[in-house]
Image (cartoon, helix red, strand yellow):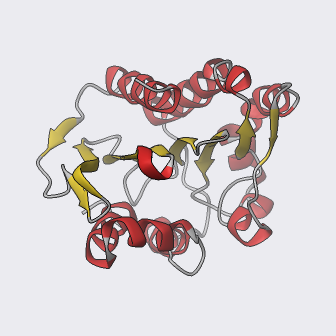
Amino acid sequence: MSLPADLCERTLQRILARHPDLVAQDTPLAELTSPMSPAPVGSVRIFRGEAVAKVVYVGLVVPMIHLDSHMIFAFTPEDSAVPHFTLDSVYGGSYHAFHLDLIPRADLAVNLPYLDAAFHPLTPVFEAASATEGLSPAAVGPRQRAVMSPWMLVNRATEEAFASIDAYVNAYADHWSTLVEKGLPNPDGVDLAARDAAVRGNIFSRDVDPVWAQVSRLLGDATTDAIRAELVANG
């Protein structure tokens, strides 16, 4: 198993162990095919539960184009203030990369108690990761950053640095699981479900994230949009 696949699988199993009510679901996306390869090029796995409403894993592995990409999104219910969790781990032929974040459910600038409870405890981890030798900022523009959190870690990495990030990933995942277990009070004046629908629509928008154009070239528009639909909504 590759470093990105191993990191993603360990993190997925860590989440499933903390939230044992999550149950694997059947999906027509369980085997992803492409004109580029006679063999399957990836898979989607979906788990559903209660406190964690939905976990989506997407893996794409195509050696001929040096693609080895694995992603987890763990979504809380639409009416929950607990952030969503995400990890993306990638090998692109000449570099490793990862994206790690908790996605806010309220505007942080006007909800300081929410910020302090949900995100501030991650600051030492964020600072330690940002100072790790062998990590460098990934090419993510301010538009994409604006729909995530200021605690987002999105970096390219040497092989040695990538192999050392487990502690940071585990810290984010464990903090998130603790928030799920304890809950967070709903910020005043926030329509959580409406905000979540809008934010997820933006995060997984073809217009906002150019990766979807690349996925379409590999899988076709219909399959790509079916994956996006699983990420946009818990239903």
Look at the picture and state if 208 lies above or below 158. Answer: below
Q: Nearer the viewer, residue 21 or 160?
A: 160
Q: Is residue 123 left or right of residue 104?
A: right
Q: Quadrant of the N terminus?
A: top left
189 or 140, nearer to the observer: 140
Horizontal side of residue 27 vs 179, given as left or right: left
Residue at 73% across / 72% down in the picture? 143
Picture quadrant where residue 193 is located:
bottom left
Tell which of 184 and 75 is nearer to you: 75
Q: Is residue 86 above or below residue 122?
A: below
Q: Residue 91 location, x and y as percent?
A: 56, 40
80 lies left or right of 39? right
Q: Which quarter of the picture shows residue 169?
A: top right
Examine the rendering and report whether any part of residue 204 can be seen.
no
Q: Is residue 72 above or below residue 164?
A: below
Residue at x 54%, y 54% (from the top left corner): 186
Q: Which quarter of the rendering shows the C terminus?
A: bottom left
Residue at 73% from the left image edge and 58% from the top image edge:
108
Instruction: Give the x, y percent position of residue 104.
Output: 61, 55
Position of residue 235 in the picture relative to residue 184 (left or right): left
- Horizontal and vertical percent for residue 26? 11, 48
Q: Is residue 160 visible?
A: yes
Residue found at the very far bottom of the displayed protein? 207
Quadrant of the rendered structure where residue 16 is? top left
Q: Looking at the image, which residue is at 60% across and 45% down?
A: 102
Q: Position of residue 231 (x, y in %)?
A: 38, 61
